[in-house]
Image (cartoon, grey):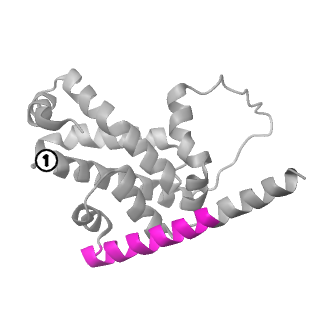
Amino acid sequence: MIGVEFSAVLARARAGDDEAFAVIYRDLAPAIRGFARGRGAKDPDDVVSETMVSTVSSLDRFTGDESAFRAWIFTIAFRRVSDEFRRAGRRVTTESLDVVHEPRGGPSAEDLALDGLAGSPVGAALAQLSQAQRDVLLLRVVADLSVRDVSRILGKRESAVKMIQQRGLVRLQEILATEVSSRVSVNDGDSR
């Protein structure tokens, strides 16, 4: 989080200061990207871009502190991912058989770090949760939002968010425990 400087940074960003907006971007982009990846967005970087473009165009309408700003940004990000899913559901993707895909260069260090969650047991476990559980946990943990903020974003009562979070954490723990015990069993079998 930006901290005590937030009000000044926000005021400068509203005035069109590119450096101030860069501070906001650097603070929020990794969390937005992680949230988008966790929700299964096809192109998390596109979600970050669309979220930031929407932020710039409506920055003058925002009121509140840094916590409210994060909630506002993740509301936009949540809607962008939802929009992506709706668009994907309406279109048929086709690909020319003549196209040869060139492998791109190795991933950047940032991509490797951000993909760490997706390729980890936690990322695989998140994929096994219900969409509601995944959304709540991503918004609470990755976006670091309050229960109140998450309830507003998802349009659910705070008590429902707490219940979904609790059930999601229990389910996540069960999945990870099963994963760990199966890895131990496989490793025990390999040592013989």
Depth order, front residue of 65/73: 65
* Amino acid at pointer 1: Phe
Name the residue at 50% across, 58% down: 85
Depth order, front residue of 189/88: 189
As for residue 98 lying within the magenta part, the answer is no
Query: What are the residue bounds of the magenta stretch?
Result: 156-177
Depth order, front residue of 157/123: 123
Q: Is residue 176 above or below residue 64?
A: below
Label 1 crowd (10 A; few <14 / some 14-19 / many >=20)? few
Q: Give the percent coordinates (x, y) of residue 160.
A: 32, 77
What SS does tag 1 mark? Answer: loop
Name the residue at 86% across, 51% down: 190
Q: Give the percent coordinates (x, y) of residue 36.
A: 45, 49
Name the residue at 39% across, 50% down: 142
Name the residue at 36% across, 77% down: 163
User: To which quarter of the image does residue 133 belong?
Assistant: bottom left
As for residue 165 lying within the magenta part, the answer is yes
Q: Main secondary structure of the magenta part?
A: helix
Q: Is residue 4 left or right of residue 167?
A: left
The reply to whether residue 129 is visible in this rendering is no
Q: Label 1, on which residue?
A: 62
